[in-house]
Amino acid sequence: MKKIRLGIVGLGSHGTGHTRNILNGMCPELEITAVCDIDPDRLAVHKETFGEFPAFVNYSDMIDSGLIDAILIVTPHYFHPPIAIEAMRKGIHVMCEKPAGVYTKQVKEMNAVAAECNVSFGMMFNQRTNPTYIKTRELVQSGEFGEMRRVSWIITNWYRPQAYYDSGAWRATWSGEGGGVLLNQCPHNLDLWQWICGMPSKVYTKMKFGKWHDIEVEDDVTTIVEYPNGATGTFVTTTGDWPGSNRLEITMDKAKIVVENNVIHLWELDVTEQEFTVSNKVPFCQPKFTYSQVEAPGVETAHCGVMNAWAGNILRGEPLVAQGEEGINGLSISNAMHMSAWTGKEVELPIDDEVYYQMLMERVKTSRRKENVTTVISDLSNTYNTGSDNK
Amino acid sequence: MKKIRLGIVGLGSHGTGHTRNILNGMCPELEITAVCDIDPDRLAVHKETFGEFPAFVNYSDMIDSGLIDAILIVTPHYFHPPIAIEAMRKGIHVMCEKPAGVYTKQVKEMNAVAAECNVSFGMMFNQRTNPTYIKTRELVQSGEFGEMRRVSWIITNWYRPQAYYDSGAWRATWSGEGGGVLLNQCPHNLDLWQWICGMPSKVYTKMKFGKWHDIEVEDDVTTIVEYPNGATGTFVTTTGDWPGSNRLEITMDKAKIVVENNVIHLWELDVTEQEFTVSNKVPFCQPKFTYSQVEAPGVETAHCGVMNAWAGNILRGEPLVAQGEEGINGLSISNAMHMSAWTGKEVELPIDDEVYYQMLMERVKTSRRKENVTTVISDLSNTYNTGSDNK
């Protein structure tokens, strides 16, 4: 079997997890041939844990080493686009951890380079491999139930204690992450949301900064959106609630869908509400419907599924789980949420990238980087929040 | 047994329902001794259905007739305060259907008169007799679980077809109702919401007018609120979705509560989240909790329960289900939602009553009263939306 020579940049908790998966044989078409971290201590820990690999402290050196065909970018978010751009220009295939970047201006540049370079470019949206969400998307996008009318996602099961935020100097700072729960935990949900429901056209957000933690960025977000067809939605998230909820409700002309605890509940009307309301003559009367739970066959292949699809894309042109270029969608919603919260106004999408960049940079200027932080590498294997039942 | 002599003003669907309950012996301390409707046809229908009662077309005449000790006001909303005020000034006890009125300026006047007059003044918030909501309120207000952090109420099971709106010329017009789903269906929920969670201090609302129906008022409402303690919330309602949802989720420092299908789900933490986060040293770790379903004993006595408590209040000083003066709370939220939607801005409570009144009157001026409408009196006994399971 032909193996793709992979370099991993960023050996924190996620980079360590990916290393373990690959060394455990879960990605048979990928072989780690180089690793990179700006912090020599991390390289030392990696060597101690996993054995020796060609190691770099500078990602450009790894890209230019001739040792790798492909790069997995697992650095803090701000570095995703510049590393991806440099790699793509050198003909190196790119898999980028979420989010695509911190601000859309930067991600647009990355996408423009991707369009010019003949490389495979994927985003690590591992939750797109969850059969529940795949099936939900099919239901919504099939057209069978008419148009979407309303969506409410309460996604508050991203609890993080203060110790989490104290585990890395870059965490939850404007200069290190460029945001809080929206940039670190919610990129999955923002991506799934737009993947299932499409992109909203207007966003109003109430945001609280450091409400539940000693951090400068948002840890509590409440949003109202509007879609081009006039449908409306809410999105509520936080890292302060436990046990939180993960409940996605979508109303359509001919159905209601609720996704909770990895179960899809479907109420299907006999006719669309529009058809019913024009023919019915009784003041208190409702369309008939049937209730069912929808099967979502398959298993969630998660991070390895994304990596293996990427390998298949590189080797045989098979489809990616998520095109790299799609990373901008969820980030656009995230940026719009911040802009709305900062201005106190509803904002229209697409937002002005340059204005957003300036607003963010103002906050970066006075960002409070944490002192005396001991970096902790955590085992993340049980933290990926796939919608399990908290009962 | 001493019976209170009751006059009913407004013999539409609700007035008819109340008449039926009382004549069926469900309110043993109340005796209907007069009825009133501005429409002689309705009086004729009432007579034909229930037999002859002293009948009036002018409510002042009924109030002055000497035939009644108490009045049940079941007219279109605009008339609630003026009728209540006139009755109270004549020493007549008042039970007012929801909402208390259409705009807070008017309701403040009603409450001021109530404060001067020694009469019993109750609001028909029949859903306050639902043991599920009584128990939920106890849980939230007990202090046992700390402070409220977040509330989300999706209350979209108020479906009404076009035929409903076509069943009365006053329905769903600025001049006739002064609003749509917030003024007709949701007063119950707005009251329960503030009764359980307290009054919000800020409101932002996206509202759609005649989105699902041929009406001029709102039939689709999405709101974000903030409370004095910084807690946030969402409230989503419509008369366009079927089958809708009725799901109330409340997060507190030491618990999560979900009320759905008349079941109270409780997740109780061992310690408050605040206590956990300062003592815990592990980045990915959560407070322990236990899940249970909370029993809510008792039966929902509904409209008759409210009427019987009112009779007990008049005769023996027993507590009302809802003090008349409390009607202004839900209406204040409703008015704030309209003001926010009309201005596109977050508004602070209390709103400026006079400004709201002017904004409403502008809409009343050009209100499109419906022509050629045949008034229909409906049996409402199955329309009271007590949170039943739609599965």
Image (cartoon, coloured by chain):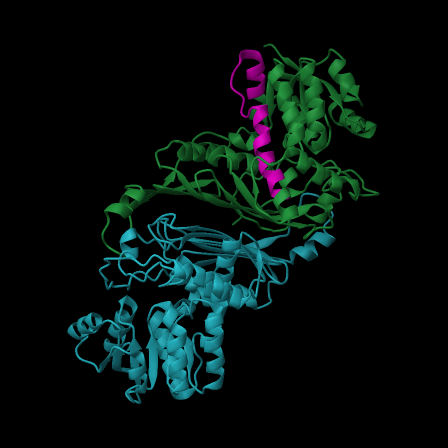
Chain colours: A green, B cyan
Is residue A6 at least partly visible in the picture?
no
State the residue at coordinates (43%, 38%): A229
**Image: A3 above or below B276:** above
Q: Quadrant of residue A127?
A: top right
Residue A237 among magenta residues = no
Residue B222, percent from left and from top: 48, 51
- A168 displayed left or right of B118: right
Q: Quadrant of residue B188?
A: bottom left
**Image: A389 above or below B143:** above
Q: How many marks overall?
A: 0
Is residue A99 at least partly visible in the picture?
yes
The quadrant of the rendering that contains the N terminus of chain A is top right
Residue B52, percent from left and from top: 17, 80
Q: Which residues are magenta?
A: A309-338
Q: Nearer the viewer, residue B224 or B133?
A: B224
Q: Nearer the viewer, residue B152 or A224?
A: A224
Residue B247, percent from left and from top: 45, 54
State the residue at coordinates (23%, 54%): A282
- A97 displayed left or right of B366: right
Residue A334 among magenta residues = yes
Q: Nearer the viewer, residue B37 or A172?
A: B37
Work out which residue is located at the far left of the displayed protein and give it: B48
Work out which residue is located at the far right of the displayed protein and give it: A372
State the residue at coordinates (39%, 82%): B86
Residue A30, percent from left and from top: 63, 17
Q: Quadrant of residue B373?
A: bottom left
